[in-house]
Amino acid sequence: MPEDAQGLAGFGYELGLLKRVRRSGWWHAGVKDPESVADHTMRAAQLAALIAAEEGADPARAALLALWHDTQETRTGDLPHTAGPYLAKPDPRRITADQTERLPERSRSLVRKAVDEYEARETLEARCAKDADKLEMLLQAVEYRDAGVARTDGWIDSARKDLHTDTGRRIAEAAVTLSPLSWRDR
Amino acid sequence: MPEDAQGLAGFGYELGLLKRVRRSGWWHAGVKDPESVADHTMRAAQLAALIAAEEGADPARAALLALWHDTQETRTGDLPHTAGPYLAKPDPRRITADQTERLPERSRSLVRKAVDEYEARETLEARCAKDADKLEMLLQAVEYRDAGVARTDGWIDSARKDLHTDTGRRIAEAAVTLSPLSWRDR
Amino acid sequence: MPEDAQGLAGFGYELGLLKRVRRSGWWHAGVKDPESVADHTMRAAQLAALIAAEEGADPARAALLALWHDTQETRTGDLPHTAGPYLAKPDPRRITADQTERLPERSRSLVRKAVDEYEARETLEARCAKDADKLEMLLQAVEYRDAGVARTDGWIDSARKDLHTDTGRRIAEAAVTLSPLSWRDR
Amino acid sequence: MPEDAQGLAGFGYELGLLKRVRRSGWWHAGVKDPESVADHTMRAAQLAALIAAEEGADPARAALLALWHDTQETRTGDLPHTAGPYLAKPDPRRITADQTERLPERSRSLVRKAVDEYEARETLEARCAKDADKLEMLLQAVEYRDAGVARTDGWIDSARKDLHTDTGRRIAEAAVTLSPLSWRDR
Amino acid sequence: MPEDAQGLAGFGYELGLLKRVRRSGWWHAGVKDPESVADHTMRAAQLAALIAAEEGADPARAALLALWHDTQETRTGDLPHTAGPYLAKPDPRRITADQTERLPERSRSLVRKAVDEYEARETLEARCAKDADKLEMLLQAVEYRDAGVARTDGWIDSARKDLHTDTGRRIAEAAVTLSPLSWRDR
Amino acid sequence: MPEDAQGLAGFGYELGLLKRVRRSGWWHAGVKDPESVADHTMRAAQLAALIAAEEGADPARAALLALWHDTQETRTGDLPHTAGPYLAKPDPRRITADQTERLPERSRSLVRKAVDEYEARETLEARCAKDADKLEMLLQAVEYRDAGVARTDGWIDSARKDLHTDTGRRIAEAAVTLSPLSWRDR
């Protein structure tokens, strides 16, 4: 039992790394101090719940899948797109297996199943979570553009092309025409 | 329909503020550049799922409640503890009502119900989410202590006294004896 | 006597919080790492002296009033404009009373009278200090605009409309047409 | 007249540099991201007013002198102590003369007289302002020590030896025995 | 010819990424905002020259090898140690080949030969450069320790065990007993 | 001998200051958190090697000269251009003499000769290193411009006018027409 608690606490500390690991892709866009993986993950999980609500999927499940979608980066860091030709994409399931090894059974099963379902992309909830991941990046790209960053078009376009739910696509279309701050003035 | 999408996109931009708003309490502990509210929220939601799994509650629901628990801070900022005597605590439900006003029905209902359930603290999932909020702060306090910050004891103690699930308490006991980084050496 | 010194030292440490507390309003404009309340206060106090000199008021008194105008934020943080509908504005005099409780008589009286005079806005020096507060924000808004931030117009306009001395208005008109850095090239 | 306003606005922008220029001495102590010159100046001016109140001097005048005491650093930066053997200390009055050249007469005279009085160190107000400069550094050194920085003793000791008012010395003695945060717990 | 200049300028911009990419290993030690790869590379190259001078090797050559030793990280980022089990180490020579593809012949040959020599570790200059890489990390670990970071022992020990020149080992022994700042007091 | 090692380790710690000292000129352009002197030095040394390769000079020697060209700033900080009228430029050779006083003979001679050769500007390698210093600033200016900073033209123009090798000039012409990030899209 105390070992269970240690496993959970140790996993909690490992997840804390995501509060420090930066979203490395933005360094390529010239952003010196980009947001953390945790910053990204929070909004992705919130958007996953909203997209799922509109798509008729289970919002809590979609949010849960999004919550673990980048947790493997405590071990590998956030690999930038340019690493593609040089590094074989690591298997998220294998990293998750190692990360959750000392968790008590119920927690371990919870996390592993969430990662499995997200990676398989077969359920509607997994697709909502994946769209949320892309959409979060699109919103952030527009926010950086409004903060003066010159070359965010590539990020915006690649996100728009990679959305699979109707709700995700509709939010993206609205987001690119809307100013990040205009909600304040309505 | 496009208005729905605008409402969702605008809400997404408002949630983006949580990636910039700092957890202001740490300024009192001497931390110059504390983590964001989003950083805190991600780990709180993950811990909520784990605690719920161990407590026999619904992990996805507990995580969903935790995801929205500080979202009112886009409007008020993160009020430090010392503000207590001077400011009446704002009503989270009223702020949430305003924030979700332009959302389509299903999304609006989702967020409002999650905030209602969390604030009422009547379900086991709400109690797991609340414990996760406190536990996240405790883990962060130990992490700041290991980064050299002198006066984190008050934060650690206040978090330990304010936990209501058995799992939350057991993780806390393990966390204060465990080093944030010792998981790497096991 | 040693108690007096402890009161002064403790107050000095409390004022140090203003070096860490960020000017939260800029988070709404998309600025990730805005300046501290202390940063703002220094220039506001300097501008108060200059405005007072031009208006025929007492420059040292105007500067002194400006120096304490945001010191209550050690207790409440910097409340953003959007908090308005949800939080009753705290009474600066009450917070100042608490902050200065352990100061020796002369220091306590000095700070309390300065806050009283500033808040009453009845003397010319108080009006110069208030204009300096607004003007400092206007200069900062133009500086952020030149650093790439997209939506600073609202800040600039609201500051311009809220100036009450002739000198404050004239500096504002010059500031918006002048580049923050053109003084170097003259 | 519009030229006067331009002179004042341009000077306001030049003073804004102090919000970005870092207190370079702390880099030698291993602090990566030290506070700005403006951060230091605000608390120095506040302390100058408090010391003057206790010493029976004019608090507003002492604060005004402290407000301009480092403003020459918009031109030279903050020269670290180690530069001593290699650089002749620049004349603050000469830099101030250049900085205030385009100010209208009353503002120009105000700033130049303040710098003259501070540098001459002949009035009690100037001595209070100078002590405040040293005391602010001492408080900051203790704050950095409590944030984990190892080698702040030299800064603390050099500040203690360089105080000339009785009040300044008494606050320093209290400050080194008091914790920066213990005011919260009293 | 203009194409040559474009190749060189483009390569210069790619190298600029190293000023933004953080040394990710320190996130594991709890450092929130670690230094850049460029920060590390400068001191590594300087140390390589010094070690080579003492070892009777060619200092300029050793420095040149160190200057390119992490440049592949513009494509892959700085992979943390914990990525080892999940990612096959990318081939530096292959990345360098791609990075230098558009350089004019002499520049391309220069960089490729430097990377080849460094990776082969056959010359004394390559061994000096490699020791400089480790030694730079050791010095930084002691600097972070003195800034309050709790768990730097692992970094210090692993660096000490991985030095291959006599000079490198002697500097390491001196460095761990010496305070980073005591040079100022001599 | 142990004294030699202490001299080298102490010098290594002194060089570490360059990882913290900021390139102060950018504060004048409105950049809040500019890169370190070490960041600048790494790319300057790399560019020096490339320019030398194209000019038929010794690339390793040019890089070595560039590596020490700003190391005197551990003592003086990075003096901004605006300090010119108020401070006599310190003699780099004299500072280097003091910095290297406790180094063993071979290291001391290496550094002193490199600084002498760079400052004399008589060899082709010294001219390549000097051009690299300017060119690095030009590339950084374009990078800041693309990050939203308004007034980088002065920096770009002054760098372009101050290049003395044909290769340096050609890279500069290409750099100002090329986007910092377009190398990714080619």
Image (tube, coloured by chain):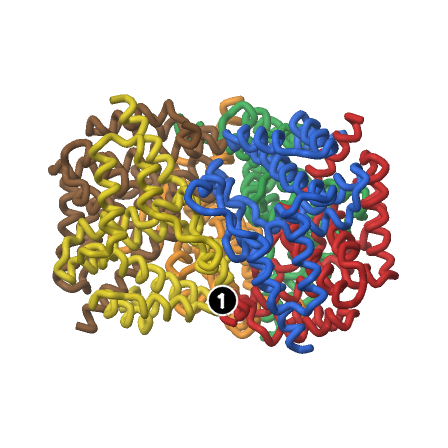
Chain colours: A green, B orange, C brown, D yellow, E red, F blue
Residue C58 picture quarter: top left
> As drawn, is A78 to the left or to the right of D92?
right
Q: Residue at x 72, y 41 (%)?
A: A81
- From where the camera sits, is residue F54 visible? yes
Residue positioned 45% across, 43% down in the render: F83
Of the pair B128 and F131, the residue shown nearer to us? F131
> Of residues B6 and D147, which is closer to you in this image?
D147
Along the line of sight, the residue nearer the viewer: C137 or A44: C137
For residue E139, above or below residue B13? below
Dot 1 amino acid type: Gly
Q: Is residue A6 shown above or below C36?
A: below
Q: Position of residue D143 (x, y in %)?
A: 39, 63
Q: What chain letter is assigned to the residue under label 1?
A: B
The residue sitting at 64% across, 76% down in the picture is F3
Residue that badge 1 annotates: B148
Q: Determine the secondary structure under disc 1.
A: loop
Image coordinates for residue F37, horizontal then vertical, percent: 58, 49
Residue at image position (66%, 42%) is F130
Q: Can residue B152 be seen here? A: no
Compared to D123, does B112 lie above or below? Answer: above
Residue F10 image offset from top left, x and y in percent: 60, 68
